Image (cartoon, rainbow, N blue to C red):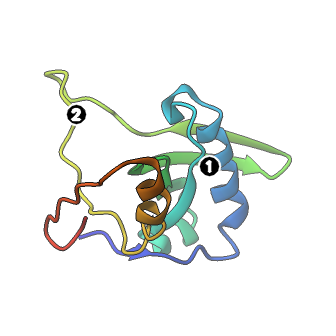
Amino acid sequence: MPQVSETIPDALAPRVDAAVAWFNNSAESAGDIFKVTGILDVDVALNGSDELRLIMCGGDRCEQRSFRVSGSSEAWAIESLDNLSTADGTKPQADLDPPPGVRSSWLDKTLPQHKFVVLLFYRGFW
């Protein structure tokens, strides 16, 4: 089971920032601005792997995305490692629930925009 850390180590911060900026400028962000709310298996990334597995939230969604970030801070080489569809064309099953607290301000922001909001509780998440 992947280990999720909500804290990004200082040693990985430049690579994480570069990956998020790259993703936010891609078509996959769909115009939303994402921020990192967690990192998976931080020990692997700290031990020299170019792969970063990030949990990012933006707009009304949270997603786990994987990136290969190599090079140096002057010229990062970034690529997505996500295979967003399976052989039959469907999206793969999510491996992770969003980390706690990532939607803490969502309800306060959404209520003034609508007459009512329906919350669906699933496995302790809403």
Residue in the picture at 47% in, 65% down: 108
Which of these two is toward me, 42 or 44?
42
Q: Is residue 3 visible?
A: yes
Instruction: Identify which residue is drawn at 34% across, 74% down.
Output: 3
Residue 6, image x and y in percent?
Answer: 49, 76
Q: Is residue 43 above or below residue 82?
A: below
Q: Quadrant of the C terminus?
A: bottom left
Find residue 64 and report its horizontal and vertical position in percent. Answer: 39, 52
Residue 118 falls left or right of residue 17: left
Residue 6 vertical placement versus 85 (above, below) = below
First of labels 2, 1 by sequence position: 1
Q: What is the quadrant of the N terminus in the image?
A: bottom left
Cα separation, mark 2 vs mark 1, equals 22 Å
| Residue that numbered label 2 is attached to | 91
Where does label 1 land, which residue? 20
Q: Residue 84: x and y, percent?
A: 32, 33
Q: Amino acid at mark 1?
A: Val
Q: Quadrant of residue 101?
A: bottom left
